[in-house]
Image (cartoon, rainbow, N blue to C red):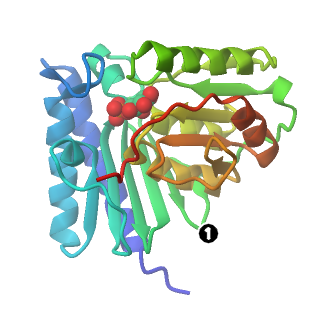
Amino acid sequence: MADPWQNAMDYAVAVARKAGAVIRHALQNDMMIMCKSSSVDLVTKTDQKVEELILSSIKEKFPTHSFIGEESVSAGQPCVLTESPTWIIDPVDGTTNFVHGFPFVAVCIGFAVSKELVFGVVYSCMEDKMYTGRTGKGAFCNGEPLHVSKQTDIRQCLVISEFGSNREPQVVSKIFSTMKKILCIPVHGVRSIGSAAINMCLVASGSAEAYYEMGIHCWDIAAASVIVKEAGGVLMDAEGGPLDLMSRQVVAANNRTIAERIAKEIEAFPAKRDDAP
Ligand code: IPD
């Protein structure tokens, strides 16, 4: 059967590559850093410029489609997934890494139709790794097929998580308490890369067995969730239910056994849904 969205996916790959080049160039120059929800929730002129580049390129080609972009939502645009073909964009996933020159920064472009994700493109631009996933057609990195790890023993697993940008003491306590419980299962190790999308691509690549995070946003995980699924992995929320992109929580793992074991240890904390008015 003909693939109606292959053209859109090819276009997303080209746009992500172009956006990555802008980010690499910006790293060599002065960057203007600003704060969003707190002094550790950073945004730069590059985030805004790259989102504008991605949005204008895609709107020119697909003028009737809908968009959810991290910086547009910050500027007051709605964050609602409708039946309409919708592009979900994080121009710079790993802004704190970008600010510090810590070399894990990704351009994320996800695409959903009738609320179902159809493809995801994650370009890890400092590593020049182009990750792609197309529902029903597999996941790839620079054209090579991706497969999750076959590990089923949690004690043999490498787990990734993040600290996020919420510094309320009760939230930080829950993050540390969850991490301690997981570390003491014991697992082989816990890592933090600083980009949700790259973390998920590492699970898709079989380099880590699981990634979880509370407080995450839909644009951080939409594109990469297709890549994890197509590499044979599973996605769920912290209660073990199906992934809800807007729920601010994600567990991505190589299989259900590992995902459920991780989810069991998570101490969730309340976070306003991305699509809350
Ligand atoms: C952030 C990164 C980070 C994660 C945060 C995200 P941003 O995305 O993915 O790893 O811990 O929760 O918000 O703000 O750099 O696009």
The answer to which quarter of the image holds residue 188 is: top right
| As drawn, 173 above or below 109 | above
Q: Is residue 69 left or right of residue 219?
A: left
Q: Is residue 61 left or right of residue 254?
A: left
Q: What residue is shown at x 47% (from left), y 62% (from top)?
A: 119
Question: Picture coordinates of residue 30 (x, y %)?
Answer: 12, 17
**Which amino acid lies under the numbered mark 1 shown in the image of this protein?**
Gly
Instruction: Find out if the beta carbon at label 1 lies less than 8 Å from the nearest ligand 1 atom.
Output: no
Q: What residue is shown at x 56% (from left), y 66% (from top)?
A: 135
In what element is the residue under mark 1? loop
Identify which residue, 16 or 37, lies in the foreground. 37
Image quarter for ligand 1: top left
Q: Residue furthest bottom?
A: 1
Q: What residue is shown at x 56% (from left), y 39% (from top)?
A: 200
Identify which residue, 140 or 192, lies in the foreground. 192
Residue 86 shows in the view: yes
Crowd band around label 1 with a 10 angstrom C-alpha radius: few (<14), some (14–19), many (20+): few
Residue 93 shows in the view: no
Q: Which residue is mark 1?
A: 136
Question: Picture coordinates of residue 71 (x, y %)?
Answer: 21, 42
Q: What residue is shown at x 37% (from left), y 48% (from top)?
A: 274
Q: Is residue 64 left or right of residue 122?
A: left
The answer to which quarter of the image holds residue 260 is: top right
| As drawn, 228 above or below 197 | below
Identify which residue, 36 or 103, lies in the foreground. 36
Q: Quadrant of the N terminus?
A: bottom right
Question: Picture coordinates of residue 218 (x, y %)?
Answer: 41, 48
Question: Picture coordinates of residue 170 (x, y %)?
Answer: 49, 16
